[in-house]
């Protein structure tokens, strides 16, 4: 049973990494789409800000890494903002799938107590 938990934990962490990267790439990709200049500049800039904030306060190896409720609030804010931006610039189906994966991943992270030890 312990090996099943380890596999599930590894998959959860893998999905977390993919979500983080896809959020940044998804926001940066708005620069290359046919949107207004404001969107093509604002969303990639927002992706950069999210990457900087996440690397400072959300990354598990950071010296300033948040813990507990503060970390959960940061995750909800970052993913919520990303989902909102995706809803503005991408297909509704893509946004809903991304949001569903975020909810499943956050639930698994906290159910498996991985937010405290994000490395295996």
Image (cartoon, rainbow, N blue to C red):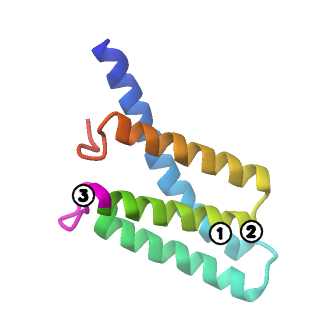
Q: Which residue is mark 2?
A: 89
Q: Residue furthest front?
A: 69
Q: In this picture, is 53 found above or below 79?
A: below
The N terminus lies in which quarter of the figure?
top left
Is residue 63 inside the magenta stretch? yes
Q: In this picture, is 68 found above or below 16?
A: below
- In magenta, the rendered stretch is 59-69
Residue at the spot x=43%, y=37% of the render?
A: 108
Q: Looking at this view, is 64 or 109 the one in front? A: 109
Residue at the spot x=38%, y=23% of the render?
A: 7
The main secondary structure of the magenta stretch is: loop
Q: Which residue is mark 1?
A: 85
Gap in angstroms between the C-alphas marked 3 and 1: 26 Å
Q: Nearer the viewer, mark 3 or mark 1?
A: 3
The tag on residue 67 is: 3
Give left or right: position of 58 versus 50: left
The tag on residue 99 is: none
Q: In this picture, is 30 found above or below 42?
A: above
Circles 3 and 1 in contact, beta carbons < 8 Å: no
Q: Secondary structure at mark 1?
A: helix
Is residue 66 inside the magenta stretch? yes
Give left or right: position of 96 versus 74: right
Q: Give the x, y percent position of residue 77.
A: 47, 66
Circles 1 and 2 in contact, beta carbons < 8 Å: yes
Q: Give the x, y percent position of residue 47.
A: 53, 72
Q: Residue furthest top?
A: 1
Residue at the spot x=82%, y=75% of the render?
A: 34
Gap in angstroms between the C-alphas marked 2 and 3: 32 Å
Q: Earlier in the sequence, mark 2 or mark 3?
A: 3
Give left or right: position of 91 versus 2: right
């Amino acid at each position: 049973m312990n090996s099943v938990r380890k596999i599930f934990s590894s998959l959860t962490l893998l999905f977390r990494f993919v979500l983080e990267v896809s959020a940044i790439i998804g926001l940066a990709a708005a620069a290359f789409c046919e949107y207004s200049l404001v969107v093509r500049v604002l969303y990639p800039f927002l992706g950069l800000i999210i990457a900087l904030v996440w690397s400072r306060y959300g990354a598990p190896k950071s010296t300033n890494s948040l813990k507990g409720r503060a970390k959960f609030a940061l995750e909800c804010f970052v993913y919520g903002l990303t989902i909102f931006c995706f809803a503005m610039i991408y297909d509704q189906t893509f946004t809903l799938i991304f949001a569903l994966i975020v909810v499943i991943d956050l639930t698994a992270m906290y159910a498996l107590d991985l937010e405290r030890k994000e490395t295996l």
